[in-house]
Amino acid sequence: MILFIVLYLSNQKTESPHGSEFKVSCKTCHSAKGWQLDKEIYSFDHSKTKLPLTGQHTEINCRLCHKTLIFSAAKSECNQCHNDIHQNSVGLDCSRCHTPESWLVNNITDIHRTSRFPLVGAHVTAECIQCHKSESLLRFDVPGVNCIDCHREDYMATTSPNHVQSGISDECSTCHPVNSLQWTGAGFNHNFFPLTQGHAMLKCNDCHTTGNYTDAKSDCYSCHAVDYNNAVNPNHKTSGFPTTCTQCHTTNPDWKPASYPQHDAREFPIYSGKHRGQWNNCNECHTNLSNYSVYSCITCHEHNKPDMDSKHSGRPGYSYNSVACYTCHPRGNAD
């Protein structure tokens, strides 16, 4: 009878307290000393599980995660063990900001680079609460990714210029680069009309005279009509000069030096051919400064009446006057 009982018990399988799916050998954690965990022989490799133990996880008591002896029932996601103090305002993936080493976050700028709003310029030094407003200071709801979502008060309070009255777009980045550290000065983007050379020293109201910053014209004459009308050397108005100032002038801090390259294409060539470098001032040929349609060919170089009369002897229609010179020599060539 005793033999029968021994044989019967030897054929019975004892169910593991760790569950039927647990395949780890008992001797990995236990010894003959008892069923308590024997740390002297403990050799279970936790790195092969869904949650390798690193950082603070290496110091905690096993029972904090393993509530029962069924180890497979332990959770592996952060939010399954840790309460979400951010109330799902930043998602459930804690590893986006935190590591097992510490809950402290010291790489906010790096984290933001992977978001919809990378931190550049003045935003690098801004306090989180300036954009992420909440009573608990722990919610990080996104107020919006457009400048105006945070800076509407700045937009409404502007006076120089008044953005609302001027009808300026609330797309702030049109004028204010996001990588700038300030709203004005070097941070202002005026690329739609580059402020270079003579324009670099101007005040805004030198061009924006009406208070409406959207109605300023980009053509030179709109701002420089007075300069055009008052010009005397040469007199632009009576000489019929074009009002497209850039044909002769650049944006140098003063109007000179001016050049009129179209002179070669439309009139007598003075920047090319034999007359290139043979003059210094316009009035060497245009002797009447009040009327640049009047010109003289016979007041320079080797021109003199006896020589010209001799060279043109027998030429029909010859006359010693500038109009006749230009009629036969419109490009300045001797032939």
Image (cartoon, rainbow, N blue to C red):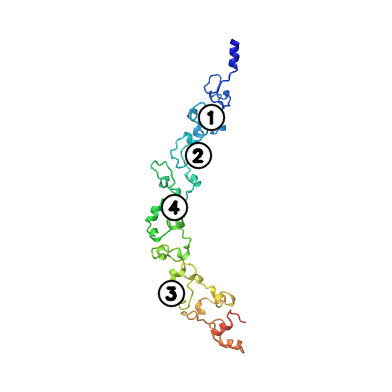
Looking at this view, is 293 or 8 the one in front? 8
Q: Amino acid at mark 2?
A: Ser
Tag nearer the camera, 3 or 2: 2
Q: Amino acid at mark 1?
A: Ser
Question: Which mark is first along the chain, 2 or 1?
Answer: 1
| Helix, strand or loop under label 2 | helix
Q: Amino acid at mark 4?
A: Cys
Tag nearer the camera, 3 or 1: 1
Looking at this view, is 221 or 278 the one in front? 221
Question: Which mark is first along the chain, 3 or 4?
Answer: 4
Residue 198 placement (x, y as % from top left): 46, 66
Question: Which mark is first along the chain, 1 or 3?
Answer: 1
Q: Gap in Å between the C-alphas at discs 2 and 4? A: 28 Å
Residue at 42%, 53% (x, y): give it: 148
| Helix, strand or loop under label 3 | helix
Q: Which residue is mark 4?
A: 147
Q: Which residue is mark 3?
A: 229
Identify whether 87 is placed above or below 199.
above
Tag nearer the camera, 1 or 4: 1
Q: Which residue is mark 1?
A: 72
